[in-house]
């Protein structure tokens, strides 16, 4: 066990002591895959420990939300996958709280909640070392033996793209992964990283590939089918396209080799093509051929429920509902994929505006605020210039939603979108934060121009320091 993991477990024990003295708690979590799995992990642990609990999902933890919670006067609130940046507001509201989060706490904050577990407090990086669900998994295991929930922690980590930088999970995530493997919950192997291996016909994997982008194939169904015919891929016995999981190892190797040759001949960088292959994570207790079998597909299914205001459906799937909740989640996923394609087409049509140190687009009401970050991230592979971070605006009830995405190369140069968005959003009367490579904020509607100009300056300073 690493020193950091030991310290986090000691901290988790202190948080568990606070929880175990209560008869009823309120759980508040984020709406994305990491937040939904975090909620499922802690609620499972609370159920098993005999602690009454209820759950509320929020898009962003704001002062109004905290005040509303305080009005309910709960015995204890457990914040999962959020809360570290709002400690001062939580304390001033009078709420007794436990925070299980992995986002960077607000810098130079002198106000600290006692029941606060966060990797940044112990020198770890919440963007790559452990997710919100991983942090909550450590807490859950101090409430009882909940090692069977390690699979959900890994699904949350993959949903939070914690494997993106290296192509596999590292550090604290790795320790949780190995624990899951030793308990028969998970297995992992090297494989193609394209989405849909469990559920999609092979040509669909290529058609919807975005990271890496496949020139001439991504977005072009006919070209993908022709490519696979050229490789000699045969149909199944029923004359239908097979899924990736249906292929023989030799067939998989032939397709990967052909994809690498295609990419290089199209002028793509070899380092980008390397992202075709990486570690994939299989949930051993889930049925093969379903979204829940593969951690990437599972996390996407959960994201689809949260992004369309039905995080509770994703939570029900995590808690074991494979009937009605799963059917509803699958429908939301289908709609989600369609909306992402429409969103990407909107950005293609409108284009992006380049400043000195960033690029941006304003979707207004054309792209839902809860998927604007995903569309922004996808656009860096297809439309935008990967040498600049991309910032996207979308209309929201409480103002304007801002989503920013960078690349690992930009982070190495000094980019920290979490810090940049936290500082600039506060200056214009909003609030924001997140990770170095991906962050978000909410700002007033009349502050967009001031915000983007100030953000351009601060990102320029970050990158020029290197």
Image: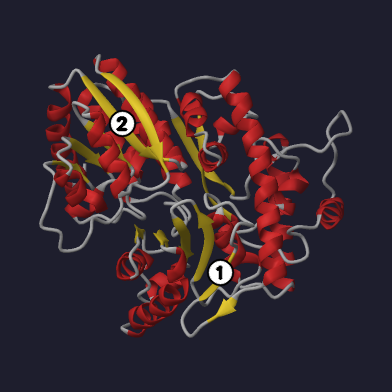
Whether residue 180 is visible to the viewer of this picture, yes or no, is no
Q: How is the image coloured?
A: secondary structure
Tell me whether circle 1 and circle 2 mark residues in contact (CB < 8 Å): no
Residue 121 badge: none
Determine whether, in the image, residue 448 is placed left or right of residue 144. right
Distance CA(mark 1)–CA(mark 2): 42 Å
| Residue toward you, 303 or 246 | 303
Residue 46: percent from left, percent from top: 28, 21
Q: Which residue is denoted by mark 1 in the rendering?
A: 271
- Of 126 and 64, nearer the camera is 64
- Residue at the (36%, 59%) spot, across then down: 435
Residue at the top extreme of this rendering: 50
Q: Which of the 4 image quarters holds residue 174? A: top left
Relative to 348, say whether 267 is above or below.
below
The image shows residue 115 at horizontal and vertical percentages of: 15, 39
Q: Which image quadrant: the N terminus?
A: top left
User: Which is nearer the eye, 336 or 190?
Assistant: 336
Q: Position of residue 189 (x, y in %)?
A: 52, 42
Q: Is residue 238 above or below residue 462?
A: above
Residue 196: name its quadrant. top right
Q: Is 1 situated left or right of 81 in this image?
A: left
Q: Which residue is mark 2?
A: 27
Q: Position of residue 130 (x, y in %)?
A: 33, 47
Q: Residue at x 45, y 32 (%)?
A: 186
- Location of residue 24 with respect to 399 vertically, above or below: above
Quarter of the image where one finds residue 344: bottom right
Which corner quadrant holds the C terminus?
A: bottom left
Residue at coordinates 73% horizontally, 59% vertically from top-left?
218
């Amino acid at each position: 066990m690493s020193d950091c993991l030991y310290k986090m477990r000691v901290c988790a024990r202190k948080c568990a002591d606070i929880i175990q003295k209560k008869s009823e708690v309120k759980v508040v979590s984020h709406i994305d895959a990491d937040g939904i799995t975090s909620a499922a992990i802690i609620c499972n642990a609370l159920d098993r420990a005999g602690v009454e609990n209820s759950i509320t999902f929020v898009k962003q933890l704001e002062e109004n939300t905290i005040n509303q919670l305080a009005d309910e006067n709960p015995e204890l609130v457990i914040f999962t996958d959020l809360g570290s940046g709002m400690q001062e507001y939580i304390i001033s509201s009078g709420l007794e709280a436990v925070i299980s989060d992995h986002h960077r706490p607000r810098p130079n904050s002198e106000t600290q909640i006692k029941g606060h577990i966060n990797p940044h407090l112990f020198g770890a990086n919440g963007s790559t070392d452990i997710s919100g669900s991983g942090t909550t998994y450590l807490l859950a295991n101090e409430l009882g033996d909940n090692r069977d929930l390690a699979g959900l922690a890994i699904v949350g980590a993959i949903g939070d793209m914690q494997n993106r930088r290296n192509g596999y999970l590292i550090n604290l995530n790795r320790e949780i992964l190995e624990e899951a493997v030793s308990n028969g919950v998970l297995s992992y192997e090297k494989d193609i990283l394209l989405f849909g291996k469990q559920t999609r016909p092979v040509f669909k994997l290529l058609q919807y590939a975005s990271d890496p982008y496949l020139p001439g194939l991504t977005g072009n169904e006919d070209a993908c089918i022709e490519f696979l015919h050229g490789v000699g891929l045969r149909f199944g016995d029923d004359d239908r396209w097979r899924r990736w999981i249906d292929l023989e190892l030799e067939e998989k190797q032939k397709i990967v080799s052909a994809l690498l040759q295609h990419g290089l001949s199209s002028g793509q960088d070899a380092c980008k093509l390397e992202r075709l292959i990486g570690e994939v994570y299989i949930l051993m207790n889930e049925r093969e051929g379903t979204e829940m079998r593969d951690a990437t597909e599972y996390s996407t299914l959960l994201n689809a429920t949260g992004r369309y205001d039905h995080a509770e459906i994703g939570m029900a799937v995590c808690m074991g509902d494979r009937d009605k909740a799963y059917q509803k989640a699958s429908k939301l996923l289908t709609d989600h994929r369609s909306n992402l394609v429409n969103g990407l087409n909107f950005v293609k049509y409108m284009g992006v505006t380049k400043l000195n140190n960033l690029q941006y687009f304003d979707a207004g009401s054309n792209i839902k605020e809860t998927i604007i970050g995903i569309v922004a991230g996808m656009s860096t592979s297809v439309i935008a210039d990967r040498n600049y971070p991309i910032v996207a605006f979308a209309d929201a009830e409480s103002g304007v939603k801002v989503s920013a995405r960078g690349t690992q190369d930009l982070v190495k140069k000094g980019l920290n979108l979490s810090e940049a968005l936290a500082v600039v959003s506060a200056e214009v009367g909003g609030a924001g934060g997140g990770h170095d490579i991906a962050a978000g904020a909410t700002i007033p509607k009349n502050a967009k121009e001031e915000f983007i100009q100030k953000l351009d300056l601060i990102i320029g300073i970050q990158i020029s320091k290197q």
